[in-house]
Amino acid sequence: MVEGFLMTTAREEILDRIRFGLAAARAEPGFQEPTPVAGNRVGVPVLPESIPLADTFSEALEAVGGIVHRCPRGEGEAILERVLQDLGAEKVARSDSPPPLEQLLEADVGVSYAQWGIAETGTLILTSDEEKHRLVSLVPPVHVAILREENILPDLDEALGKVHHEEPDAMSRAITWITGPSRTADIELTLVVGVHGPRELHVILEASG
């Protein structure tokens, strides 16, 4: 009973501080009340229909350090060979034929397909149903993913709808979300690329049709 009382007291103290802060902000000269919003997707920006999703995806991915290679439909593998050659990759691991772990740890590049992309953030989505070996996209220092333009979704809301299933057993056991190269600022707030995963991300974007 005492524990419940303490939790209630702490909650009220936090709410009181928030109320005090809001009141103080409203008292500041020039304060303006925010414009009222409504709907079930408050705060979600609407992507302009005049801009193709592939263009938005490419721009968003490049903004976070990714590299996009766009090509006509059916030429993804040819572009992949060119990218691997440019990278000077000698040891390549592919998710459709993953090598043993000891070889994967020595791979220069990991190659996978991406099942979906998110235009507003440049995010790749890999599901374990399709990509049997998740480590291929996480362990090698360079990750190259192949994505088709028709599989680019406008936003996270649409993406969650694609990967969600009413029956829990029907959902992929693991879903990997990748937005640009791996990066962290955990150490002294200094941004470091490639600590927890690939330091370089290439996406080969195949056109529709």
Image (cartoon, rainbow, N blue to C red):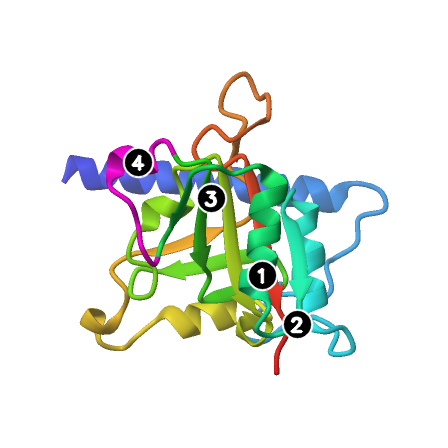
Who's the residue at 59% across and 39% down the image? 87
Residue 202, given in percent of the width and then of the height, sits at 58, 49
**View extreme (right): residue:** 30
* Mark 3 lies on residue: 15
Q: Nearer the viewer, residue 90 or 207?
A: 90
For residue 103, the mark is 4
Q: Quadrant of the C terminus?
A: bottom right
Q: Earlier in the sequence, mark 3 or mark 1?
A: 3
Q: CA distance from mark 2 to mark 3?
A: 56 Å
Which region is colored magenta?
Answer: 96-106
Q: Which residue is mark 2?
A: 72
Q: Residues within 10 Å of mark 1 (few under 14, many from 20)?
A: few
Q: Hey, what amino acid is under mark 2?
A: Pro
Callout 3: 10 Å neighbours few (<14), some, many (20+)? Answer: few
As measured in the structure, the alpha-carbon distance from the residue carrying label 1 to the one carrying label 2 is 11 Å
Q: CA distance from mark 4 to mark 2?
A: 32 Å
Q: Amino acid at mark 3?
A: Leu
Q: Earlier in the sequence, mark 1 or mark 4?
A: 1
- Residue at numbered disc 1: 78
Q: Is residue 120 left or right of residue 159?
A: right
**Proximity of marks 3 and 4: CB atoms separated by less than 8 Å:** no
Res. 118 in view: no
